[in-house]
Image (spheres, grey):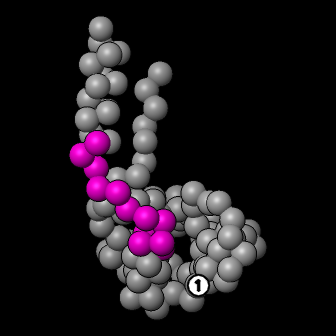
Amino acid sequence: MRGASITQACLEELESAKTVSLLETVIEVTGFLTQAKVEFLVGGSLASSLWGQERTTRDADIAALISESQLDTLEQLVKWPHVMDARDMRGSLTSGRDFAAGQILHGETIIVRLA
């Protein structure tokens, strides 16, 4: 019965959650990047859809050239409902790799699956 009550609680939470479009989230995240003076571009399926080559997508690809000081600023700007793991991003910056990835998520759109 415990599983049923957890499932019901999750369903109630999802029903009360605000629906946020992918485009709204991209606008918010690129606003954070702009405020932190980070150079970026939006690519992938979202960009091609905006240019008329429609593709189904559930995420957005944003490439950014970011420094540690910009990451500090970004960490101060990103607040709930957005979520970012600054420690993971900082590790990517200091890894010495040519390409590193980090994520900024919209917390209200994350669905946690319980086993």
Q: Residue furthest right?
A: 98
Q: Is residue 25 magenta?
A: yes
Q: Position of residue 113 (x, y in %)?
A: 46, 32
Left or right, 45 with reference to 6: right
The mark tally for this picture is: 1
Relative image position of residue 50 (x, y in whole percent): 61, 79
Range of magenta residues: 15-26
Q: Quadrant of residue 3?
A: top left
Residue 112 location in percent, x, y? 43, 37
Q: Is residue 42 visible?
A: yes
Residue at horizontal 32 percent and vertical 74 percent from the top? 76
Residue at 34% across, 53% down: 108
Whether 11 is drawn above or below 72: the answer is: above
Image quadrant for the N terminus?
A: top left
The residue lying toward the viewer, choosing from 76 and 114, is: 114
Q: Is residue 12 left or right of residue 92?
A: left
**Horizontal arrangement in the rendering, residue 61 relative to residue 78 (left or right):** right
Question: Picture coordinates of residue 78 (x, y %)?
Answer: 35, 70
Residue 102 vertical placement versus 75 (above, below): above
**Residue occupied by mark 1:** 40
Residue at horizontal 29 percent and vertical 56 percent from the top = 18
Which residue does the image show at 50% across and 78% down from the upper left? 68
Q: Nearer the viewer, residue 12 or 71?
A: 12
Towards the viewer: 88 or 34: 34
| Label 1 crowd bin: few (<14), some (14–19), many (20+), radius 10 Å | some
6 to 107, vertically: above or below:
above
Please tell me whether mark 1 sits on a helix, a strand or a loop. Answer: strand
Describe residue 36's horizontal placement relative to residue 41 as left or right.
Answer: left
Q: Amino acid at mark 1?
A: Phe
User: Is residue 78 or residue 57 the one in the foreground?
Assistant: 57
Can residue 34 be found in the magenta stretch?
Answer: no
| Residue 48 visible | no
